Each structure stands twice: as C-alpha cells, then as structure tokens.
Image (cartoon, rainbow, N blue to C red):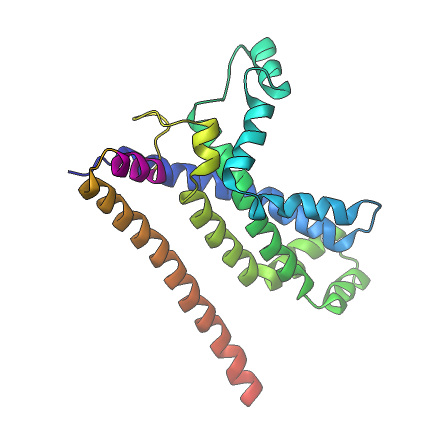
Amino acid sequence: MVEWQPVILSIKVALCSMVFVAIFGVLAAYLMRNRDFPGKAAAEALFTMPLVLPPVVTGFLLLVIIGKQGPVGRLLDEYLHTQIIFTPYAAILAGTVVAFPLMYQSAKAAFLAVETNLEDAARTLGAGEWRVFWTVTLPLAWPGLVAGLILSFSRALGEFGATIMVAGNIPGKTQTIPLAIYFAAESNDLTQAGLYVVIISVITFSLIFWLNSWARAKAKPFSAKVVS
C-alpha cells in the first residue's frame, strides 16, 4: 500500500519552488540580459553553480547558512524564535536553489531570442520599460519560460541530496518521494520503493511529454507561415 504523504509533500514543495524560481529566475535573467556591470560573469557563474555542484554540497552550504549556528538561522532564532531547518520550508528552499539554474538559463535564452527592435519600437511609441516587458518581451519569451517552469518543477520534485541535508527524513513532515525511495530501498522494501519510482516517473514523463507536444503545436503555425 502506497503512503501518499511523500507524494503530496513532493508536489507541494515542487510547486512552491517553481513559484519562487519563476519570480527570481525570470527577474535575474531579464536584468542580466539588459545590464552590464563589473562582476557580471561572476554573478552568472554563481547563479549556475547549483546546476553543476553535487546536491549534497549545495545542501551543506544551505545548512551552514540556515542552520542553528548559521547567520540566517541565528537571526530567525533571535528575532522570530523559529527555525526552518528540518521543516518543509527547508525542503522548499532546497528545491528552489537547485532548480533556479534551470529556470535562469531557460529564461535567459528566451529573452535573448526576443528581437530587440520590437522592444525598441514599443519604446518609441511611448511605452515604459515595465510595459515593454509585460506586453512585448514576456509574450515573445513565453515558450522558453514555460519550458523553464516545467524543468524547474521536475528538478525540485526529484531533489534528494540538498533536501536530506537541510530538511532531513521525517516521515509525515519532510519525507519527499526521493527520500521515501531511498529509505524504502535501504530497508529492503523494494515493492514500496518501486511504487514511488513509478509515481515520480509517471509525473515527470507526463510533464515532459506535454511540454514537447505543446512546443510542437506552437511551432506548426509558424512553419505554415514560413512555407506560405
């Protein structure tokens, strides 16, 4: 019998992480595309690091920051009398950090693909920067942003290394699907682990399948216009 708590928690964590990476990833990509400043290359490297670092290293760095002895952990304890370590919020933070590079890279590529002359035309007609962003840049970059959202959700859904470092494996509280798979397999409950593998595989396959189908459907009208 499948215990559905890890599935529900994983989906909640992935959805919350997706919201955060959508906000910060899109904002960071847009600013990086339009601004040049000293240290830009270093900032972009920092944004991408969670993609190439082992997740357990990312989790350790988060633990150092938000743990009870970390700077953020101390502030939370001193002023709010609370901690996010070993809570579902820590799992959301871990999912957000590891998924951020995927959203950032997808959004950056999408914004770079937008024709700047269309944005300049909107500006000449009196549109401000935010209006240009919402009415020109965002709609044209939308397919790439959707791809980033789906990839970020899938990455946060499958996060293991950073999550176990900062959220732990507390059944009914912080146990996500990847953690449930690992500890079920460790206890030789291969049936339970296999069921969780099937569930997470079906979810991620469905998302990627929908994304690919949606992208092809969006490309067909464009191809038809080019041929005509």
The percent coordinates of residue 36 (x first, y second) are 82, 51
- In percent of the image, x 63 and y 61: which residue is there? 109
> In which quadrant of the rendered view does residue 111 lie?
bottom right
Horizontal arrangement in the rendering, residue 209 relative to residue 56 (left or right): left
Nearer to us in this view, 139 or 68: 68
Nearer to us in this view, 199 or 60: 60
- Highlighted magenta segment, given as a residue range: 177-186
The percent coordinates of residue 177 (x first, y second) are 33, 39
Magenta segment main secondary structure: helix
The percent coordinates of residue 190 (x first, y second) are 21, 42
Horizontal arrangement in the rendering, residue 112 relative to residue 152 (left or right): right
Above or below 70: residue 190: below
- In percent of the image, x 55 and y 84: which residue is there? 225
Locate the N terminus by quadrant: top left
Q: Residue furthest left?
A: 1
Above or below 118: residue 163: above
